[in-house]
Image (cartoon, grey):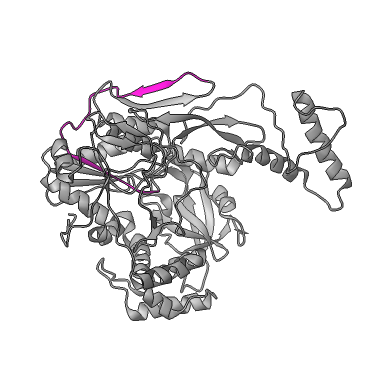
Amino acid sequence: MSKGKTVAVPAVIAVLAVASGGWLLQRNVGLGANLYVQVRVLEEVVNRIERHFVDEVDVEQLYDAALEGVVQSLNDPNSALLQAPDWEDMQIRTSGEYGGVGLEVASRDGFVTVLAPVPGTPGYRAGLRPGDRIVEVEGESVVGWTTDQVAQLLRGEPGTSVRMGVRRHAVDHLIPYEITRAVIQLSAVPFALLFEGGVGYVPIEIFNGTTSSEVSAKVDSLVGDGMESLILDLRRNRGGLLLEGVGLSDMFLDAGSSIVEVRGRTSAVEHYRAGTDQEYPGMPVVVLVDYRSASASEIFAGALQDHDRALLIGAPTFGKGSVQSLFPVSAGRVLKLTTARWFTPSGRSIQKEPREQLLTTENGVITRRGEAVQYPDLVDRPRFNSAGGRVLYGGGGIVPDLWVLQDTLTVLEDEAVRKIIAVENQFLQAMHTWAVRYRQEHPGLEPGFVITDQDLAGFHALLVEREVEMTLENLRQARRTVEYLLGSEVALQAWEDRGRFVRYAALDTQLQRAIELLLAARNPEDLFRLAGLPSEGSPQVGGGLGGRDGSPR
């Protein structure tokens, strides 16, 4: 997570790269004795390589490799030397806006392809569709270009125009577009809705510069529609700005309540507290979390859990309890460096160590959605107490109050899905292409569409066409997962995030457990009592609702 929007500029930055085994460069020179000697040694080595190495070398790449080696030697996955395009992407994600046409693009089959136009943007209004291949920009072919290279051409000053040439499935000719760029707002909250019984639902995708204001607006709107309880969904939320995590926590905690404490090696301890009384006192709140909830997501979830303000349901979070600062360096690059660790109000560090122990499909259980889950190992985990005396756990991510497992697979299904995971990238690219064609072949598509045997066979034919090693029988054995993945992609392209969510809400056991509890809870105390939490505060395992369906309206 980035520590706010401001960056510090160091007075002197010097680097030294050490290759495996070290470098023996000059006799009787101690490499640690003098900073300037170290810099000179690096320059001498690069010069020798440039002049005398048997093959021609790119000097710029050598220095880049040396710099990256310095950062990698920290053995910290959250520290990195960002090139100018990567830095620009990070600024866009954290600020929530940029100048451009409003297209989400990615490389598909060697072409920069539109995954989705952002609703309400120039690209959306111009009629660009998922699956469109961008093959020309300003009359120049961009076939074979990287996504970053094309994105750089599409972004620009609002009010300026850009000409594009697009290839579309089942259209023989090149489709020309001239689109006027505008300020593109990236929403942190794609939608919000109200379930029957007054249960509100707000998904939060990222903690960027507008997250707390977007959530506040959505919640206020739901309250006006009769909301009595609230679900905040942080699943898949990778985090973002620390100050936005603090700002969102402030909305649900009383003035003066501790939110997070940041401790660095060379700076004073920073305490963040709620500045105003909470906006929705007495409202029962559930926060949904999973393995991909990280960083600022964990700050928010941890603060509300420590203060007994929300019930956490789902699976243990990622475990990123560190803070990164941004330092501009030469050539438009930026050093993203871990400079501190953060702690919840009860004093918990949720940092997962070692970082190599990441959840994968190899060490976890696979769900119907093709995702890995793993029951939390609480042995030897440090214990802390919430404001109400409940026992909470530090280290290894935040352990939810109720660990609810999504629908898992049979032995045969598990085996079949693992074969799909082995060719994941090829499978996903084919899935996107298949969904584009499916939509075009079904212009009157309804949300309740069904993936048929014929659809499955057609998708398999596409896999064969792309030389993906996958049998039709394997797809049939993994049918529940394949149907979910194909249907989810079609629904996303047809009706965006809200439509996809509504289609699968009844199958989401974590969501349904939250709805069940909130329908019965009159206040936060009721919520914890109904969850059946034992006095020692250990996480409980809760299943689905036995067929109860919370239908959105």
The picture places residue 133, in percent across and down from the top left corner, at 51, 63
Q: Is residue 274 magenta?
A: yes
In the image, residue 278 above or below residue 460: above
Q: Quadrant of the C terminus?
A: bottom left
Q: Start and end of the magenta stretch?
A: 267-291
Quadrant location of residue 84?
Answer: top right
Pick the front one: 483 or 124? 483
Q: Is residue 531 magenta?
A: no
The picture places residue 10, in percent across and down from the top left corner, at 61, 23
In the image, residue 549 above or below residue 339: below
Residue for point 45% across, 67% down: 418
Left or right: 221 as drawn, with respect to 433: left
* Residue lying farthest to the top in this orientation: 268
The picture places residue 152, in percent across and down from the top left corner, at 56, 48
Q: What number of labels is visible? A: 0
Judge whether residue 407 can be spotted in this image: yes
